Image (cartoon, rainbow, N blue to C red):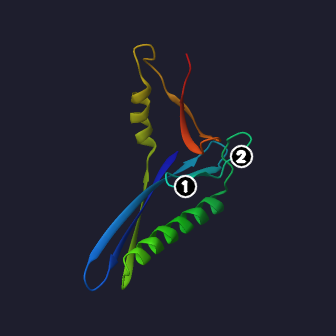
Amino acid sequence: MLLEFNSFCFTHNRADVKGAGHSMLVYKAENDKYIFFDSNKGAFGFCPDTGAANFTLEEVCRVMELAVNRYSYDMYIENFADYCQVYIMLRNATLMLKKAEKLYETMERINSKIIDISVDKGMNKLLLTPASL
């Protein structure tokens, strides 16, 4: 399962209102462990030797909380705001995988499916691995 996690922050001061948002992903592996992915920071919660997910539910929730705090704090400081409002949106992004699977389909790979989500340890990026024929 893939969960999209969005943080939106709106800062208000006497002169202006500004907003910014950031999307992150939480991947739940079959072993009930998690990987957290932030495109600005990379992937967290995986074994550096195997690339397998290893965050517990409590650990991934803590990382999500830290991410919200960081992005809202940055927005608050950058805009010298009187106050900041933070909105969080979660949605099941598993259906987005269906569209990603279409991306991998070619004439040679009519029925390709993404069979694994892992981490490129060298680049610290999330990988979607299609089935090999």
Horizontal and vertical percent position of residue 120: 61, 39
Which residue: 65% across, 52% down? 45
Looking at the image, residue 15 lies above or below residue 78? below
Looking at the image, residue 127 lies above or below residue 78? above
The C terminus - image quarter:
top right
Who is closer to the viewer here, 69 or 88? Answer: 69
- Tell me if 95 is positioned left or right of 127 in this view: left
Corner quadrant of residue 61 = bottom right
Which residue: 40% across, 14% down? 107
Q: What residue is disc 1 on?
A: 41
- Tell me if 20 is positioned left or right of 41 in this view: left
Horizontal and vertical percent position of residue 70: 51, 69
Q: What residue is disc 2 on?
A: 47
- Dot in front, 2 or 1: 1
Which residue: 63% across, 42% down? 30
Looking at the image, residue 77 lies above or below residue 111? below
Q: Earlier in the sequence, mark 2 or mark 1?
A: 1
